[in-house]
Amino acid sequence: MTELRNLAYLVVATNDLDAWRTYASDVIGMGICQPRADTIGLRMDDHPWRILIERGDDDDLTHAGWDVGTPDALDAYVEGLRKKGADVREESADRANARSVTRLYSLADPNGFTHEFFCSRTGRNDDGGDLSAVIRGPGFHTGDLGIGHILPVARDYDASVRWYQDVLGLKYTDRIRQQMAPGVYADATFFHSATGRHHSLATGAFPSRKRLNHLMLEFCDMNDVGAAFDRAKAADVPIILELGHHPNDQMFSFYMVTPSGFGLELGWGGITVDDATWKPRIHDVMSDWGHKRNIITIA
């Protein structure tokens, strides 16, 4: 089956566009645009936007957009989904235009949001994303690796792991299973796409009223992680996990709460997967140092 290349964009609903605008620009350091009324676009690079914030009551992830690469690859991927019995649908030209793509297909995720698939992005602008002046380094690590990763909360963990592999076609990277108390485990499974970011999607079963546990954005410069951590604290943004390091993707990062209530991980140093040499394993800790937890549940 044709593979997804990378996670290219996200769509999030919110009831507070102004809070997201300030948070994205002043705390994270993203560029800001307004694709249409009642939306703001969050920029990271030459794409017209990487995260679209729309006015809505959900305050949660609504759509995840995947780049399939070429028109032929998109056709083959959609055909492969249909052969598996997946109810994949072609979206209207208006919806495709709103996503700044030429053609668009969609498929419902069992955990309550929608995946979208496309093969080319329109409206790209060679301005580096017009990032906020608070950024110190070159910006965000995107390109062929995509936007970063998402961790949706699994309604049925085992079924979700199977669906992401067998239907969506993501490849198993590794797993973390940490004993939190006698007989009580935190468990997450990680998946990568064709271009090899350690994981573009992970899932686990966690107490949450949100569909999205967190999303991750990666800086090109380690100093931007520390600077963003300082800005978040100065702005009284709740910190979920303080600075620390993950053993599986080797990410140095911290986690904070977004205006929509789910988490945002800002990191640096994540590894990529070479399928020819990668050997999956099960880790027994979520973090090998740091990541002191300040908030038990975030929503």
Image: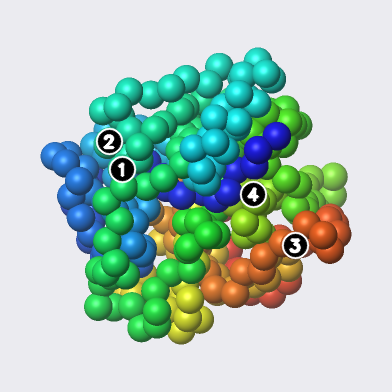
What residue sits right under mark 4 in the picture?
193
Residue at the extreme front: 72
Q: Position of residue 184 (x, y in %)?
A: 79, 45
Q: Which mark is residue 149?
A: none
What residue sits right under mark 1 in the picture?
100
What residue sits right under mark 2 in the picture?
97
Q: Position of residue 281 (x, y in %)?
A: 85, 57
Amino acid at circle 2: Asn
* Comes first in the chain, label 2 or label 3: 2
* Comes first in the chain, label 3 or label 1: 1
CA–CA distance in space, label 1 to label 4: 22 Å
- The reply to whether discs 3 and 1 touch (Cβ–Cβ < 8 Å) is no
CA–CA distance in space, label 3 to label 4: 11 Å
Q: Position of residue 299 (x, y in %)?
A: 46, 43
Regarding residue 263, the answer to whether it shows in the image is yes
Q: Residues within 10 Å of mark 2 (few under 14, many from 20)?
A: some
Element under disc 2 = helix
Residue at the extreme left: 37
Left of 270 or right of it: where is 7? left
- Residue situated in front as seen by the camera: 218 or 180: 218
- The reply to whether discs 2 and 3 touch (Cβ–Cβ < 8 Å) is no
Left of 170 or right of it: where is 298? left
Q: Residue at x 25, y 78 (%)?
A: 133
Element under disc 4 = loop
Q: Nearer the viewer, mark 4 or mark 2?
A: 2
* Comes first in the chain, label 4 or label 2: 2
Q: Residue at x 46, y 49 (%)?
A: 8
* Comes first in the chain, label 3 or label 4: 4
What residue sits right under mark 3 in the picture?
274
Q: Residue at x 27, y 36 (%)?
A: 98
Q: Residues within 10 Å of mark 1 (few under 14, many from 20)?
A: many
